[in-house]
Amino acid sequence: MRASIPGLLAAVLTLAACSGAQFSPVQLQGDPMSISALAGSWAGEYSGGAGGRAGSLSFNLRSGSDSLYGDVTMTDPTGQAIRAADAAEIHRTHVQSPQQLRIDFVAVHADSVRGTLEPYMSPDCNCVVGTTFLGQRSGNEIKGTFQTRSGGQLRAQGTWAVKRTASGG
């Protein structure tokens, strides 16, 4: 049985749409000099928060670009699934697994970085939470803190750090 060109194209577009955050860039806010200082691939971890939650985070920013691609992989020590607040079929169009959360907003000023993650369901309260993060870049490393809130109430806080693993080429 032969596949049609439109059918193949539809299949390729469907796979591309589901393959992850590369199709959901985050446009950075800030001056061009501050943004260019973040060019490269960054990877690291975060820890703290309710129940000792921890995970990995990564983002990429190409030289000359003002949009980054990044996500946070969240793990819960109790084994409960972490899921985004939006519907699963929508969530899968911008991340590669249910435990990944999209970085929604990032602003940079000089060596300071702040941003937010997409809202998600927190297993400790079974409620929608939002996380904000703040960090300070020093050379090839960014260290900072995060806070997770629901309805204005602080639910968790902790620390995070990333290191530049490759230049922005």
Image (tube, helix red, strand yellow):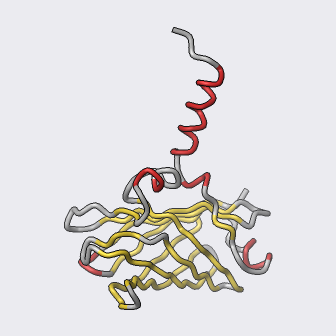
Query: Along the horizontal axis of the image, is 58 left or right of 54?
Result: right
Query: Along the horizontal axis of the image, is 5 left or right of 82?
Result: right
Q: Residue furthest bottom?
A: 153
Residue 40 seen in the current view: no
- Taking the spot 58% from the left edge, 82% from the top edge, the residue there is 114
Q: Nearer the viewer, residue 61 or 102?
A: 102
Quadrant, the C terminus:
bottom right
Q: Is residue 132 above or below residue 164?
A: below
- Report the number of discs: 0
Percent from the top left, x then y, of residue 113? 61, 81
- Taking the spot 62% from the left edge, 75% from the top edge, the residue there is 106
Residue 65 seen in the current view: yes
- Taking the spot 30% from the left edge, 73% from the top edge, the residue there is 53
Q: Nearer the viewer, residue 102 or 159?
A: 102
Q: Quadrant of residue 67?
A: bottom right
Q: Residue furthest left?
A: 78
Query: Along the horizontal axis of the image, is 109 left or right of 128?
Result: right
Percent from the top left, x then y, of residue 57? 47, 66
Q: Residue furthest top?
A: 1
Q: Quadrant of residue 128?
A: bottom left
Percent from the top left, x then y, of residue 156? 34, 84
Q: Nearer the viewer, residue 66 or 60?
A: 66
- Taking the spot 76% from the left edge, 63% from the top edge, the residue there is 65
Query: Along the horizontal axis of the image, is 60 left or right of 82?
Result: right
Percent from the top left, x then y, of residue 140? 61, 73
